[in-house]
Structure formats: C-alpha cells, structure tokens
Amino acid sequence: MPMPRLMGACRFAVEFLYFGFKNARACLFVSLFFAAVFLVPRAGLPGLARYDVLLVVALAIQAWMVWSGLETVDEVKAITLFHVVGFALEVFKTSSGIQSWSYPDAAYTKLLGVPLFAGFMYAAVGSYMIQAWRLFGLRVVHHPPYWMSAAIALLIYANFFTHHYIGDYRWYIAACALGLYARCTVIYTPVDVERRMPLLLAFVLIGFFIWLAENISTFFGVWRYPNQLGAWSMVHVGKWSSWSLLVIMTFTMIANLKHIKAQIQVPD
C-alpha cells in the first residue's frame, strides 16, 4: 500500500500503527493461548482439569489457524519441532533431580510430570517468529554462516541441560552470539518502505516480552518456581537473558529451515 504523500510525523504514526497491527497479527496464537491461560479457572472445567483444557484449546487454535489459511502445513511442521524441543527441556527441568520449576496441578494429559500443553508455550514463540517473517517480508543481511549459527544454537540448548552439572556458560555463549550476529541486520516492511533493525536488538526485545509473559503465567499459577511456592514473587530478571538466548535458538532454527528449503527447492 504505497503512501507517497505521507512524510515526517504522519508517516511515522501510520507505520507505527501498521507495525503494531502486524505484530499483533503475528501474536495471534500467543494472544489466544494466553487468553485461555487467564480465563480457564484453576479448578478447570467440569470433568476436565485446567492443564487438559489448555491442551484442547491449544490444539483447537492450531487447527483453526491451518483451516483458515493463517498458517501453512509447512509452518505447522516447524512449530511442531519447537513443541518437541521445548517439551524435552520441560521434562528435564521438572525432573526430580533438577526441579527448576513445577506444574502443581493434576491432569490426565501429563507425561513424565509435564502437561502436554507446555510444549505449546515454546511453539508459540516459533509461531510468532514465522508469522512475523511472512507479514513483514523479513530479510536478513550479513547473516553468519549457517553452520556457525547452528553450532551456537546447539550450545545454547545444551547449556540449558549441562549447567546443572558442569557450570553455566550462558554468558560465554552469549558473547559468541554477540560477535556472530554483530553485523546482522533484519530488514522489514511495515507498509511500503523497508526499515532496518539490528538483529540483536530484536532478540533482546522479544526475550523481554517473553519474560513479562512468564511473570503473568506464574502469577496465575500455571507453573511455579521454587521461590514462588509459598507466595508469588517476580521472576528473576536474569531469566530475561535465558529467554533472549532461547529466541536466538528459535530464530536460528527458522532461518536454517528456510535455508535448507531454498537449497532443495526445484526452480520453476
């Protein structure tokens, strides 16, 4: 939608509104899912526990988005991968030897102590990124070699597990990621003009909003950290860095999947 006559403050205002609208549209799955988190009573619905209801809602939202054409089958395949990766991490973090957090409520759809809906919280991050990539027509310039970005993503994921045994190397990995993506810029189009943003800034901002969502979720008792079992307290700000690293991992998975698909796609 070209807007050649708009300049200065008017153009900024219109682009800002479009930027917000497209981000809201990209957050559709996230918004609907967290609305269910807030609206479903702690006691659940008659005959169905809260965690079970949230799983049904998440599956229904996903099915509706595919049916309506808001998500493609390929996108659902990628989101399923995020679900599996996230659920595996949840199982480890809530295991008896670790217990970084817990899901205190009973449910029929718990597997290894983790409700199956939990993977959708990670899938929601992937869904947002995939939707935003398409809606904003994202392009990335000065992307590092794909094997290097994949190696950093694997190190980030591994550190979530290994720091319980051999120390937390989060900041060393973050420093490597900082150097790897320092020149990387994301180009996006709110309306009709391309804009630029340092990719690292996008990682930090998305990580911050996930940290806010985590505070809301723990306040409503969806899950609890050990220090929140007696009374709710704010999630430590240090978790912001963990979420930002998870965002880097998620972005890398999407970028590499798109790269692989482009490499194997047969030209018309």
Image (cartoon, rainbow, N blue to C red):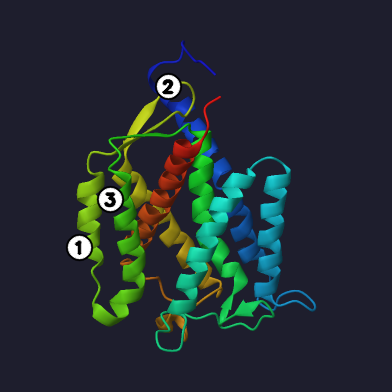
Q: Which mark is residue 37?
A: none
Find disc 2 in the rendering and name its residue.
193
Q: Which mark is residue 172?
A: 1
Q: Tag 3: Cα neighbours inside 10 Å, few (<14), some, or many (≥20)?
A: few
**Residue at x-position 56% and y-position 24%:** 268
Q: Which of label 3 and label 2 is nearer to you?
A: 3
Q: Quadrant of the N terminus?
A: top right
Q: Position of residue 185 (x, y in %)?
A: 30, 36
Residue projecting furthest to the right: 46
Q: Position of residue 133 (x, y in %)?
A: 48, 39
Q: Position of residue 5 (x, y in %)?
A: 46, 10
Nearer to us in this view, 197 or 246:
246
Q: Secondary structure at mark 2?
A: loop
Nearer to us in this view, 102 or 234:
102
Between disc 3 and disc 2, whose residue precedes?
A: 3
Q: Secondary structure at mark 1?
A: helix
Between disc 1 and disc 3, whose residue precedes?
A: 3
Whether 267 is drawn above or below 149: the answer is above
Q: Is residue 15 left or right of residue 241?
A: right
- Please indicate, yes or no, whether residue 6 appears anywhere in the rendered image: yes
Find disc 3 in the rendering and name its residue.
148
Q: Give the amino acid at mark 2.
A: Val
Between disc 1 and disc 2, whose residue precedes?
A: 1
